[in-house]
Amino acid sequence: MPSPDLSENKENELKIISKVAIGDCASIIAGVNPLAKGKQKRYAYNAIQPGQLTVDGLVGESATILRDIPCNEEQILKPGDVLLKRLNPDCAVVFEGSSKPLVTSANIFIIRPRQCLDSRYLAFLLEKSKLMQRISQLSGVGTTVAALTASKIAGGIIPLPSLDEQTVLGNLWALSKKQKSLLRAMSLENDRLMCAVCGKLYQ
């Protein structure tokens, strides 16, 4: 008896797994709220604030959050975590690690990819495919604010190629961001030098 042709089944299987919800391949973790109802504030955490998340990565200094109970262990940042602002998200930042334990404020979501999802690839999709805009909810009276929720992030649908392909795309995205950052810095420095030359000429 001839063996059955499984090529069609395999093709259908690939179609099924080619697009997945973020929540199926990553954990969505809320940031840390200050919680110090009692007199004793026994736990202090260094927390990344929304203003530190930029297109060039993390900038500035973290703030201190005081609590009278410890935060959840999963809220401590790990290398590879993808950070998004809860309100008006405009960039995705991959956490590269720190010499001290860090958490995020309540206005930042942590996306922690599992082994099947590359962090930089996910950040690339969030920024370049306008996925952040698609999963944001508009709210507010007068001034419209785009807000993310854990359920909206988890329900975002993304293509999932092989991990090798994800790594290539993620690294290209990271390299492109570094190049743009360097070009901006060079442009600013050039403007500064030209202004200084003009100042000298008019002395």
Image: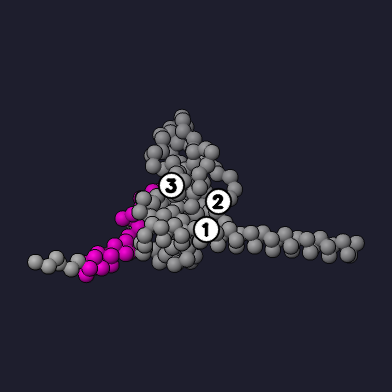
What is the span of residues highlighted in magenta in the rendered image?
Answer: 7-31
Residue nearest the observer in this picture, 17 or 45 = 17
Q: Residue at x 41, y 55 (%)?
A: 118
Amino acid type of the residue that numbered disc 2 sits on in the rendered structure: Leu
Q: Residue at x 46, y 46 (%)?
A: 79
Q: Is residue 18 magenta?
A: yes
- The secondary structure that dominates the magenta segment is helix
Q: Which residue is disc 1 drawn over? A: 174
In the rendered image, the quadrant that contains the C terminus is bottom right
Please identify the residue farthest to the front as the structure is shown: 1
Which quadrant of the figure has residue 189?
bottom right
Q: Which residue is disc 2 drawn over? A: 58
The kind of secondary structure element at disc 3 is loop
How many C-alpha atoms fall within 10 Å of the one at disc 3: few (<14), some, or many (≥20)? many
State how far apart marks 1 and 3 are (Cα): 24 Å
Protein image colouring: one colour
Residue nearest the observer in this picture, 128 or 54 = 128
- For marks 1 and 3, give the one nearer the viewer: 1
Please identify the residue farthest to the bottom as the structure is shown: 8
Amino acid type of the residue that numbered disc 1 sits on in the rendered structure: Ala
In the displayed structure, 2 sits above or below 98; it is below
Q: Is residue 17 magenta?
A: yes
Residue nearest the observer in this picture, 5 or 157 = 5
How many C-alpha atoms fall within 10 Å of the one at disc 1: few (<14), some, or many (≥20)? some
Tell whether 161 sits left or right of 170: left
Q: Which residue is disc 3 drawn over? A: 31
Going from N to C along the chain, the mark reached first, 1 or 3, is 3
| Visible residue check, residue 166 | yes
State how far apart marks 3 and 2 are (Cα): 16 Å
